[in-house]
């Protein structure tokens, strides 16, 4: 579920979950912490998320924290929608590849662990059969589960090394 931020006509941003006004920097921190943000106009309900995220990027540019190459920005402006479509397709394809590779890695790792007699089991996130893309929360949970499994295996391996 996305964190809803309302933007008022005076350009103030209001975090509806925390019941407080927030800055662009605070929204940036929320996103870096993994929160999904949705910014809407308080009066009309219009989605202002991409405009706000672009504003955060531009503020970072102004402060020289991001330093996007000028040539990249020229190309982005020059090619407009065609460039945006390309970037969206590329990002979607990359994410699908990462998820697919992650699932394949998990399958191979499970097979390898069972052959080694480690008897590792745990919740598996199965691919959706309806063709829908997994949501970001599901992906975060899957990554968290894989990290925990890896940590457990590293501990077991270290114990075996110490026993020898």
Image (spheres, helix red, strand yellow):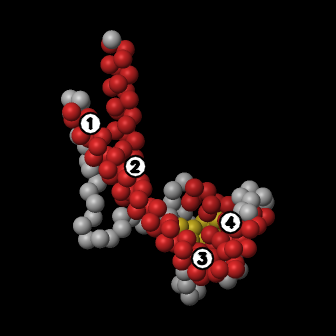
Q: How packed is label 3: few (under 14 Cα within 10 Å), some, or many (20 or more)?
A: some
Choose the circle earlier in sequence order: 2 or 4: 4
> Which of disc 3 and disc 1 is earlier in sequence?
3
Q: Secondary structure at mark 4?
A: helix
Q: Which residue is mark 3?
A: 83
**Image spot of residue 149 (x, y percent):** 34, 38
SS category of the residue bearing label 3: helix
Name the residue nearer the viewer: 145 or 66. 66
Q: Position of residue 101 (x, y in %)?
A: 37, 52
Quadrant including the N terminus? bottom left
The reply, left or right, for residue 85 in relation to residue 105 is right
Determine which residue is flagged by label 2. Answer: 143
Alpha carbons under labels 4 and 3: distance apart:
18 Å
Mark 2–mark 4 distance (CA, rounded to whole Å) = 27 Å
| Sequence-first tag of 1 and 4 | 4
Please report whichever mark, 2 or 1, sits nearer to the chain's N-terminal start. Answer: 1
Cα–Cα gap, marks 2 and 3 = 30 Å
Q: Nearer the viewer, mark 4 or mark 3?
A: 3
Circle 1 residues within 10 Å: few <14, some 14–19, many ≥20 = few
């Amino acid at each position: 579920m996305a964190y809803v931020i309302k933007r008022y006509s005076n350009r103030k941003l209001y975090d509806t979950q925390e019941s407080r006004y927030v800055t662009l920097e605070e929204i940036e921190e929320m996103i870096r912490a993994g929160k999904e943000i949705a910014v809407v106009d308080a009066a009309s309900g219009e989605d202002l998320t991409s405009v706000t995220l672009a504003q955060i990027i531009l503020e970072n540019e102004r402060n020289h924290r991001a330093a996007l190459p000028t040539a990249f920005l020229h190309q982005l402006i020059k090619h407009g929608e065609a460039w945006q479509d390309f970037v969206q397709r590329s990002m979607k394809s990359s994410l699908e590849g990462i998820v697919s590779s992650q699932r394949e890695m998990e399958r191979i790792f499970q097979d390898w662990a069972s052959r080694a007699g480690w008897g590792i089991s745990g919740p598996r996130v199965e691919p959706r059969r309806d063709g829908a893309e997994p949501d970001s929360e599901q992906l975060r949970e899957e990554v968290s589960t894989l990290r925990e499994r890896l940590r457990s295996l590293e501990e077991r391996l270290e114990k075996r090394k110490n026993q020898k």
